[in-house]
Amino acid sequence: MTFKKIMIATDGSENAEKAAKVGIDLAKSVGGKVIAVYVMDERLMQPYDVMEDEGKNALKRIQKIGRKKNVVVDEILILGNPIEDLPKIANKVNADIVVLASQSKGKFERIILGSTTKSMLENCNVPLLITPQKY
């Protein structure tokens, strides 16, 4: 199996950025491309423009990493529920693999909103590359 289309799920956290570097390195090594995905979590009580700015900034950082490595990075920024939408997006874009961090946001968000990584393990039918928290 070759991993030519690599989806990187990000929430803008430091751990997610580390995972993005792994995904971009993988893309570079196989001559693949990256699809960076940020789902603005509609369950959070934040103004839309705040979430949009966070998402755009997270995707911009991944673009910067990709440029440094000469890897093409496409972007997807949507409003939704990451737990439900990330597996669907992986299928829709025909990703060969999804790269994400094992833990990203804080403990409170994981308790209230659930673990995106756990949901991906249970619901995504695309191979996953999960980077550990202390990577």
Image (cartoon, rainbow, N blue to C red):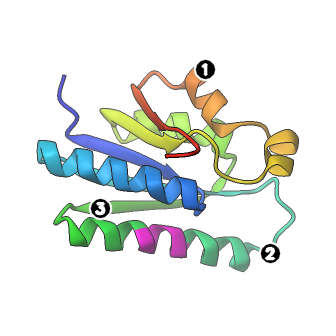
Q: Label 3 sits on what residue type? A: Val
Name the residue that disc number 1 marks.
122
Mark linked to residue 47: 2
The image quarter in which residue 75 lies: bottom left
- Above/below status of 39 relative to 112: below
Whole-percent x, y for residue 51 in the image? 69, 71
Q: Is residue 58 magenta?
A: yes
> Callout 3: few (<14), some (14-19), or many (20+) C-alpha neighbours within 10 Å?
many
Q: Secondary structure at mark 1?
A: helix
Q: Is residue 91 left or right of residue 44?
A: left
Q: Secondary structure at mark 2?
A: loop
Residue at image position (46%, 21%) is 125
- Marks 2 and 3, how far apart in space? 27 Å
Q: Label 1 sits on what residue type? A: Glu
Mark linked to residue 56: none
Mark linked to residue 73: 3
62 and 38: which one is in front?
A: 62
Q: Is residue 38 magenta?
A: no
Magenta span main SS: helix
Q: Is residue 14 left or right of residue 130?
A: right
Whole-percent x, y for residue 24 in the image? 29, 53
